[in-house]
Amino acid sequence: MTIPATAVHHRDPSMQAPEYVRKIAPYLPGKPIAELAREFGLAERDIVKLASNENPRGPGPAVRAAIAAAIDDLSRYPDGNGFELKAALATRHRVAADQIVLGNGSNDVLELVTQAFLRPGDHAVYSRHAFAVYPLATQARGAAGIEVAARHFTHDLPAMRAAITATTRVVFVANPNNPTGTWLPPAAIEAFLDGVGDDVIVVLDEAYHEYLDPALQTASAEWIGRHPNLVVTRTFSKAYGLAALRVGYGIMHPKVADMLNRVRQPFNVNGLAQAAAVAALGDTAYVEESRRLNRDGMRALEEGFAALGVTWLPSHANFILVQVGNAGRVYQRLLAQGVIVRPVANYALPEWLRVTVGVAAENRRFLEALATALAG
Ligand SMILES: Cc1ncc(COP(=O)(O)O)c(C=O)c1O
């Protein structure tokens, strides 16, 4: 159905949405492979997508088998309480199952926190160059974000602490952070938690935790005992390779979990996702191999950047920021060569591109295309 422009002009029902919803700038996802293929007349198999921090390996055999087995149950609603997955996660993190809230991606858990804790007039604090969903989820509740200037591209935790006021209900800290790949040591996070009152929910977003060097990995959920206001979020979308299934979780005090569960859709995580996540959690070799592949790919990208004479920001995640000058132009020149990366001007980083680490052949293809793009 085509709606005549005049009808929209005279009676636009979208104007009935609250102003704070109308003012939201929509999330800009990485360009899908099929879209670039259509736009540039390219074959999908010739396109390299390094734009959404996905695991380039595809699902492992254990996950494939679990999904195949779960197909027979597709006509039934999934377990709305996620019993099996929560039990596995509780064992893994040495917490009680009622401390875990499952989400349709960890993004869902971030949304649930804002839904449960923010009301119009409240404030949420987050850093500049931090994950784009924090302002979106905050604005969707009619609350306002306080964006704190970053320090050396990362969270300035003392400044974030100082930005908290009587109307601040939530603080978001991504560690490692997207899109900068920067990482804060546990002592800095703990000092921050010590300085924040228990009446402010602190979301520690650890979507890229599994990509950290194991020597740097901390069981931050253990801090919940001393800090009942702490919510740690993790995801199966990155190192576990399940981005399309949408499954993540938060670990928190049971009373905080109770609040999130009250606003959560009853069946927010589908049955295939739950089955796949249980299998993925048990397949530690897959995660280790993904981390190794990422480390080697990261090194290859850094060597490539050094050879091209461009600056990059050392990263602890599965992506890296590279400074290319006119990033919009370089992005377009990469697209024309069938390579999708992520411009980050919307993160106040107009000279940079964010590149997800791919498999070796993808990284090579990207570096060749970047050399061509920079040569003009
Ligand atoms: C820092 C950070 N947090 C959360 C997410 C959400 O991921 P998902 O909803 O797939 O778990 C992402 C995804 O890019 C991210 O970069």
Image (cartoon, rainbow, N blue to C red):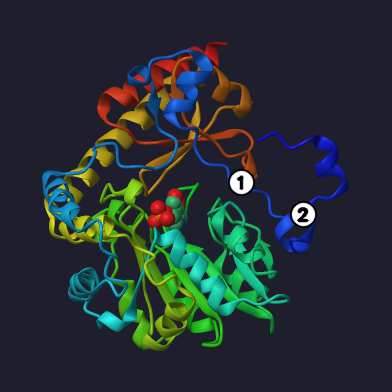
Q: Is residue 103 left or right of residue 310?
A: left
Answer with the quarter of the image where residue 249 lies. Answer: bottom left
How many marks the image carries: the answer is 2
For the N terminus, the image quarter is: top right
Q: Amino acid at mark 1?
A: Tyr
- The x and y percentages for residue 334 are 50, 20
Whether residue 309 can be seen here: no
SS category of the residue bearing label 1:
helix
Which residue, given by chain and number where applicable, does mark 1 sit on? 347
Quadrant of the rendered image holding ligand 1: bottom left
Tell which circle, 2 or 1, labels the residue nearer the N-terminal end. Answer: 2
Q: Is residue 159 left or right of residue 339?
A: right
Identify the residue at horizontal 25%, vertical 63% (top origin): 76
Q: Is mark 2 within 8 Å of ligand 1?
A: no
Mark linked to residue 13: 2
Q: Marks 2 and 1, how far apart in space?
A: 31 Å
- The x and y percentages for residue 28 are 57, 42
Closer to us: mark 2 or mark 1? 2
Along the viewing direction, whichever of 307 and 94 lies nearer the viewer: 94
**Which residue, as the protein is rendered here, is positioned at the far front?**
1
Whether residue 365 can be seen here: yes
- The x and y percentages for residue 96 are 25, 83
